[in-house]
Amino acid sequence: MVTGALGHIGSHLIRNLDRSVVRDVVMLDNLESQRFPSLYNLPKGFIFKFVKEDILTADFSKHLKGVDALIHLAAITDAEKSKQIPELVEAVNYEGLKRVAGACLKAKVCLFFPSTTSVYGSQSSVVDETCKELKPQSPYAETKLNSEKYLQGLKKKGLKLVICRFGTIFGHSVGMRYDTAVNKFTWQASTGQPITVWKTAWNQKRPYLYLGDAVKAINFILKKDLFDGQIYNVVTKNFTVENVVKTIQKFVPKLVMDYVDSAIMNQLSYEVDDSKFRRLGFKPTGNLKQGIAEKITSLAMIINKD
Ligand SMILES: NC(=O)c1ccc[n+]([C@@H]2O[C@H](COP(=O)([O-])OP(=O)(O)OC[C@H]3O[C@@H](n4cnc5c(N)ncnc54)[C@H](O)[C@@H]3O)[C@@H](O)[C@H]2O)c1
């Protein structure tokens, strides 16, 4: 089962699941994001079932019959906007996770939980999973950290799970969203708008994850049955905003910059070490140019060339 299957990651995952491991796919989404096109033209060779349900109300005892693993992608994901709707974010991301995880424990279903490298917050040095001083900077990141802690408790009760702290996703999918840095900048540049960069962010390093690498990581976990209760950072590379903007500039040379304030821009630079996951044999293969090129190619017809 994939919850939140129609979203940015889910819509790419359901098209790229490893056929040697997966045959039946139950896709659960409440269509909050209205991403109907994510269900169009799914690949042949799988048995797909779509369930329009909310994780806060769905009867998982019914839906989890015959399910071996649940990839829990459903969440309210816009970190910046989460400051305006903290109660909703708490309900869906934390209470929702509790419902899903409780159902998995009861039905003996393995759980994949995508956390975020944003749980690290501002850090002066390179951080890995052993970092004790986590400083989430938004209600979104706080719910992810609280969910991680809650899951540690269920692990002791016998839930088979794995937690991946994903870097910020970049790369094209049919259900993609545009509130995260690389996607937003690419959209702005492609549509002739100024790129809105947070005033303090130009040289700050942050961890990013190519969408293809995120899906590859989920397939890797399913194939290896890696529900070992561990937390893994999953990152393609740490980039600065300058790296991102200069790469976009290769495709849209005339882009304009606009420096803006942000409620969460006090978040300082941080770099994330993902060697724990790589040591298991996982090799990310994405790169910034490729991820940006995919999006620019999809938008090529509307890019202003004047
Ligand atoms: N995209 C990133 O940069 C990133 C980075 C780290 C972690 N993650 C995590 O990965 C997961 C997927 O991210 P994404 O970028 O695909 O998000 P997304 O916002 O694109 O997709 C989330 C999906 O969940 C659905 N949804 C929301 N509330 C729901 C509810 N109550 N019941 C059922 N469905 C609901 C939405 O309709 C949407 O299709 C999230 O948990 C997110 O926190 C994402």
Image (cartoon, grey):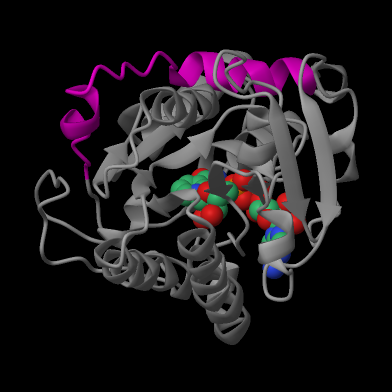
Coordinates of residue 99 in the picture (x, y in percent) = 56, 72
In the image, 44: left or right of 19?
right
Q: Is residue 273 shown in magenta?
A: yes
Question: What's the magenta region?
Answer: 271-299
Tell which of 125 and 250 is nearer to you: 125
Give the image location of residue 76, x and y in percent.
62, 64
Q: Is residue 99 visible?
A: yes
Would you place residue 140 above or below residue 66 in this image?
A: below
Residue 5 versus residue 263: which sits nearer the camera?
5
Say which residue appears at 43% left-offset and 17% top-offset.
287
| Place of residue 8 in the rendered image (x, y in percent of width and height, measured from the top left) | 66, 41
Q: Quadrant of the C terminus?
A: top right
Within the magenta stretch, is there residue 217? no
Would you place residue 34 above or below residue 178 in this image?
A: below
Q: Is residue 246 above or below residue 100?
A: above
Q: What residue do we see at 33% from left, 67% from top?
A: 154
